[in-house]
């Protein structure tokens, strides 16, 4: 007979035996819920499981019944109480459980056990995504000064390649069989630097030691820049940007563009009523809600959550209620604004001076210390797949500033200086070994007349005519060239 089956509240006025406890409940997911079964209706939920845990180690049986008004308990004008608190004061119940907050007002008429769960009040809002489209979103991964530094570095490397190659070429510090300093004019050098930054390689390929050092460091610089840009751009394009207009109760009281409210019954309503004359931020919130009652107060938690999703409304509610609703919010539309406030506790109410108060309190403490209550909580409040903290800042991407990039600029500068030093050492080495003047042949593409003459005479050869000019070159780096090439 005893357990958690439903009986009518009107039939519970007869006093039960001392170890047969009458427990008044009110429904609120997931604390207490009514479930239809093949054998009838029965109550399930966190508080029902908690009673079962207490029953295992304590000598009692219990029977549950729901209050006729289905309320937790508020003081009425005539000094009486409604809800489960009223059931105890009228003698219709020995215990009352559910999401029943321990308050000083209720302690005046009933006793409470030690709290089995602490909670805070949270401000629930609708998560709003940044729907504005930014035409120039592709530039956001880097700050303006970083972009300027990258572009300036590209021109600096191109000009540096041109100057070092031109100096080697003019002073004859090259091997005409291996080096291609002459090809690195200003246009080719700048184009090479741009191509390298775009990860396309570059032409002409550098051959001299100094050009290869500068190019190698520039390629490393380009690799880091492009990789970092790609990663940060992905974050900018995929991260949801959350607009957080309110982050505290002070912010909520200071603004008037967003409506806010609470349920029209329960301990939170009593708390705000008691703020009259305190000149606190909570009094300002209460006056604002009283001024627009139809738009501020809701009859149930579900109605409040639904209003959050469908209008510009912030709902103040117990954190466990919000956690339960967030589990079913598969679209992750609900979030909290700011940190919880008004921390309180849920307890089991008993009749004044009841011997069960101390017994239940000790057993609740034992269950909390053993971690059993935490396991029950995890069962009824499984972890949500959505982040419900609307004030988190670390989830959004940020542009990279120069301080994040200064290291690779140092690397590029160091490599460029090293390339210049190598070029200078090559020049000094050749000057130390001495110079001499020798004819240097400038290759010109095939001469049509010589080509036709070769074929008309029956010789299968292509004669390439060359013009020569006098150029100084370093004898230590070059060998004599032939005057003609026969293919």
Image: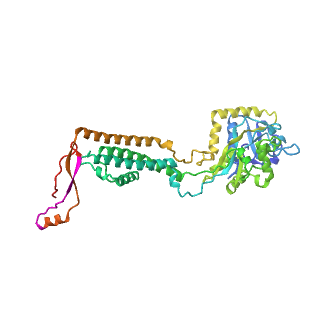
481 sits to left or right of 98: left
Which quadrant holds the C terminus? bottom left
Which quadrant holds the N terminus? top right
| In front of the other: 133 or 99 | 133
Residue 232 visible in this rendered orientation of the protein: yes
Residue 66 visible in this rendered orientation of the protein: no
Query: Where's residue 7, x and y in %?
Result: 77, 48
Above or below residue 114? Residue 265 is below
Above or below residue 468? Residue 84 is above
220 sits to left or right of 340: left
Judged from this view, the residue extending furthest toward the bottom is: 456
Q: Residue at x 43, y 46 (%)?
A: 224
Q: Quadrant of residue 374?
A: top right
Q: Which residues are magenta?
A: 456-472
| In front of the other: 328 or 89 | 328
Q: What's the colour scheme?
A: rainbow
Query: Where's residue 191, x and y in %?
Result: 37, 54
327 sits to left or right of 357: left
Query: Where's residue 336, x and y in %?
Result: 66, 47
187 sits to left or right of 289: left
Residue 262 on the magenta segment: no
Judged from this view, the residue extending furthest toward the left is: 458
| In front of the other: 75 or 58 | 75
Query: Where's residue 260, x and y in %?
Result: 73, 51
């Amino acid at each position: 007979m005893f357990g958690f089956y439903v009986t009518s509240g009107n039939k519970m006025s007869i006093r039960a035996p001392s170890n047969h406890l009458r427990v008044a409940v009110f429904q609120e997911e997931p604390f207490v819920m009514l479930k239809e079964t093949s054998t009838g209706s029965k109550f399930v939920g966190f508080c029902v499981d908690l009673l079962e845990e207490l029953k295992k180690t304590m000598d009692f049986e219990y029977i549950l019944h729901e209050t006729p008004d289905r309320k937790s308990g508020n003081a009425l004008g005539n000094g009486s109480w409604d809800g489960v608190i009223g059931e105890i004061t009228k003698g219709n119940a020995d215990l009352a459980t559910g999401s029943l907050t321990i308050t000083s007002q209720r302690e005046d008429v009933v006793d409470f056990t030690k709290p089995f769960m602490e909670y805070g009040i949270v401000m629930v809002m609708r998560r709003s995504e940044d729907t504005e489209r930014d035409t120039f979103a592709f530039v956001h991964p880097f700050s303006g000064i970083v972009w300027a530094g990258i572009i300036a570095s590209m021109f600096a490397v191109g000009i540096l390649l041109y100057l070092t190659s031109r100096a080697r070429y003019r002073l004859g510090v090259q091997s005409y069989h291996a080096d291609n300093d002459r090809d690195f004019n200003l246009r080719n050098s700048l184009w090479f630097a741009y191509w390298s930054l775009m990860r396309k390689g570059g032409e002409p390929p550098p051959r001299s030691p100094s050009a290869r050092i500068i190019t190698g460091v520039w390629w490393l610089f380009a690799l880091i820049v492009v990789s970092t840009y790609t990663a940060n751009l992905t974050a900018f394009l995929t991260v949801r940007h959350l607009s957080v207009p309110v982050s505290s109760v002070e912010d909520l009281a200071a603004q008037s563009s967003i409506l806010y409210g609470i349920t029209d019954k329960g301990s939170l309503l009593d708390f705000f009523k008691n703020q009259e004359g305190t000149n606190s931020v909570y009094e300002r919130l209460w006056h604002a809600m009283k001024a627009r009652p139809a738009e501020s107060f809701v009859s149930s938690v579900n109605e409040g959550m639904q209003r959050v999703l469908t209008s510009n409304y912030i709902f103040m509610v117990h954190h466990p209620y919000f956690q339960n609703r967030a589990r079913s919010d598969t679209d992750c539309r609900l979030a909290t604004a700011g940190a919880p406030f008004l921390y309180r506790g849920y307890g089991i109410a008993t009749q004044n001076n009841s011997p069960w108060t101390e017994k239940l309190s000790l057993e609740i403490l034992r269950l909390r210390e053993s971690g059993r209550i935490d396991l029950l909580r995890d069962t009824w409040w499984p972890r949500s797949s959505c982040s419900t903290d609307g004030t988190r800042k670390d989830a959004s991407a940020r542009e990279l500033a120069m301080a994040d990039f200064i290291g690779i600029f140092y690397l590029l500068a160091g490599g460029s200086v090293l390339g210049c030093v190598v070029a200078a050492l090559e020049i000094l080495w050749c000057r130390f070994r001495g110079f001499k003047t020798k004819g240097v042949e400038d290759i010109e593409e095939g001469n049509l007349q010589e080509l036709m003459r070769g074929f008309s005479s029956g010789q299968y050869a292509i004669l390439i005519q060359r013009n020569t000019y006098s150029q100084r070159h370093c004898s230590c780096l070059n060998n004599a060239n032939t005057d003609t090439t026969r293919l």
